[in-house]
Image (cartoon, rainbow, N blue to C red):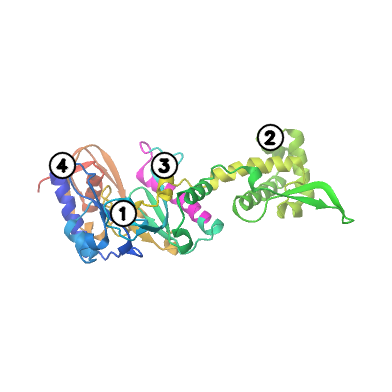
Amino acid sequence: MDGRTREYLKGRFGDYYRRADISPPPAGNEREWGYITWSAGGTTMVRHHSLLDLAGGGDLGGFLAAERPRHVYFSAGRYDDPGAGTMGQKGWRGSDLVFDLDADHLPGVDPETTSYAEMLASCKDALYRLLDLLESDFGFEDLEVVFSGGRGYHVHVRRSDVLGLGRRSRREIVEYVLGEGIEFDDIVTTRAVTGSAGRRSPAQKRTLPDGGWAERTGERLTAFLEELLAMDEADAIARLREFDGIGEGKATAALNAARNNRAELEAGNVDVHPAVYGLARHLFEEVVGAESAPIDEPVTTDINRLIRLPGSLHGGTGLAVRRIERSELEAFDPLVDAVPETFLGNEITVYGREETTVDLRGESFRLPEGVRSVPEYVGVFAMARGHANKTGE
């Protein structure tokens, strides 16, 4: 990015901040603040400031309008002295639990071949899985969901009982969300079976209890068996034989067990037949693969992490970092709703450094190499991503 382009973007970011109403996060005065400037290197981080240091009396809006930063961050951590020059001097009080989903890290996404719109769609699917895990399995409520302004989403948990969690406890949460280190036998509950006369039998019953990965697996098992029972038997057996270790005999036995033990299966009993238990083990692996959330582990485990400020602009796209109400998530389209109004209604001239396509506000713009007049929000996006430079007027 050349000097003219940096100065143009810095100026227009300043125009945005003069009009924006941006509020700090809860306990903003207990957090460290940092920002990246529009220097030639593009990565100069200014940090170890309190909100009072940064904003001169706490006027965050005034600071943003005057400094016009490229990126703005606050810490997940809360401190006695957030402006101290080293982490050891700050006096840690606790940290929000923060989850980051970045399309770059999603399985099956190749940033070189996947379009920006497709990457964001994949990331939103992963976000739904993450929210389901946090809300259903952990019981977290009042989550703050944020579009990062770049390639993903952030989720903030600020419940009082998570603030004091250390790195090891946060790592355990990460492993659960990722589905790492969880074995099928870990989620199965085993109990002794009592005979009809009240005497204890040496037999045992293995069940999938309510909640968590066990309940997810149980639901998948019963739904899958119902699908099989609705099929022609030959097709159902062929479908079961697609699983490793399940031949025709085990497939037939699993179908018979499913027909004769529906109530037991719905209650979570996977010991109605060894073939059913083996099938449940296979489906558990599918469930973890399909319903885990590929979060960025270091963001969640780092109690001192800096995270983007909602309402600020992302210097790599020119899009806004947006808080999203849970009820509005389904309708939220980052390529429409995160485009700042400041950049609407104007045409600018840019020089395309390379041919690229920009999809914003429901339209697709092809920018060839060379000089081109485009809507300003398209030009800002292309310049921020390094595809174009600002021309002289």
Q: CA distance from mark 1 to mark 3?
A: 34 Å
Residue named by callout 1:
89
Image mark for residue 141: none
Residue type marked 4 = Asp
Query: Do residues under tags 3 and 2 come within 8 Å of each other at their CB atoms?
Result: no
329 or 372: nearer the eye?
Answer: 329
Which-is-in-front pick, marks 4 and 2? 4
Residue type marked 3 = His
Q: Is residue 145 left or right of residue 365?
A: right
Residue named by callout 3:
105
200 or 40: nearer the eye?
Answer: 200
Residue named by callout 4:
2
Residue type marked 2 = Arg
Mark 1 neighbour density, 10 Å: few (under 14) some (14–19) many (20 or more): few
Q: Secondary structure at mark 4?
A: loop
Name which quarter of the figure residue 339 lies in.
bottom left
Q: Is residue 61 visible?
A: yes
372 or 179: nearer the eye?
Answer: 179
Residue 323 coordinates in the image, percent (x, y): 36, 60
Which-is-in-front pick, marks 3 and 2? 3
Query: Do residues under tags 4 and 3 come within 8 Å of each other at their CB atoms?
Result: no
Residue type marked 1 = Gln
Q: CA distance from mark 4 to mark 2?
A: 61 Å
Q: Secondary structure at mark 1?
A: helix
Q: Which residue is rendered at x = 30% and y = 58% of the image?
A: 82
